[in-house]
Image: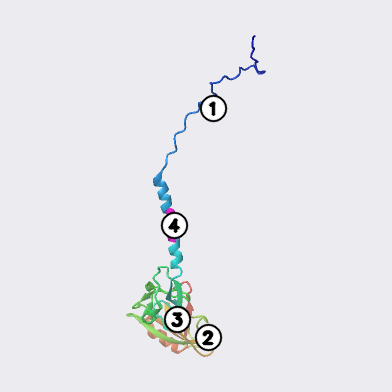
Amino acid sequence: MRISEKTPQDGRAPARPGLSGPAARKLPVPPRERKPALAALAVLLILGGALATTLLVMRSGDRVSAVRITQQVGAGQLIPLSAMQEVQIADTGVDYVPWRFRDQVATTYARVTLLPGTLLTEPMTAKTTDQVGPGKAKVGLSLKAGQMPADLRSGDVVQVVYVPAPGRGSATAQQKVLATAARVHGVGSGRSGGGLVTVVVDTSIAPAVAQYASSGEIALITLPGVK
């Protein structure tokens, strides 16, 4: 009896057992190479980051007493106790002046102009000052309203101007600047909106400033951009 094989309709011969197609002939994939060093480094980085975060959280709870400035102190001026306040701050490693040293701070001078709210550090202070020293003199002025700015404060830098009084006999008397940049050493209240002001000037012009001030012929002009 004859057996005939049925040919597929598409004309291709049926696949025989034992023969493989293209998918069965793929090259073997090599095993994935492991890098234990990189894995260990990643673990160390993760642990290091977690440790740093833990230390920051722990240190943020440490509080220290520091000195905060409550009123402006001009460069070259003594830092008074009245300008200091105790504050509790986080111990971040910054060398703030501890509150227990406030009495020592009161014997030092401001190296720069200290503004209210400043947390004091040691580099901001100095044992001595060149603002009042050889070649410098302090001159007291009793000024009327209009001869000084209303918001004048210690530490401000001003021009000291000679303003001739009206009706002065000499027709050649003219307004002139006696000091281009004098430091205000102190400001006190006076009558009728005026004030008692102490300025630091060169010794060469101190007598003239005192003379003109006694006759009410001195005016002060602030220089906000100069510290």
Q: Earlier in the sequence, mark 2 or mark 3?
A: 3
**Which x, y percent locates residue 85?**
45, 80
Rendering quarter of residue 154 = bottom left
Image quarter (top left, top right, bottom left or bottom right) of the C terminus = bottom left
Where does label 3 land, which residue? Answer: 83
| Residue found at the far top of this picture | 1
State left or right for residue 168 relative to residue 135: right
Give amino acid for label 2: Ala
Where does label 1 land, which residue? Answer: 23
Residue at left offset 44%, top offset 36%: 31
Q: Earlier in the sequence, mark 4 or mark 1?
A: 1
Q: Is residue 45 visible?
A: yes
Q: Is 39 a magenta residue?
A: no
Q: Label 1 to label 2, Cα distance in Å?
A: 102 Å
Give amino acid for label 4: Gly
**Which x, y percent locates residue 20?**
54, 23
Q: Nearer the viewer, mark 4 or mark 3?
A: 4
Residue at left offset 41%, top offset 46%: 38
Per the rendering, the mark at residue 49 is 4
SS type, badge 2: loop
Give amino acid for label 1: Ala
Q: From the image, give the main secondary structure of the stretch colored magenta.
A: helix
Q: Nearer the viewer, mark 2 or mark 3?
A: 3
SS type, badge 1: helix
Q: Label 4 to label 2, Cα distance in Å?
A: 63 Å
Where does label 2 land, which residue? Answer: 145
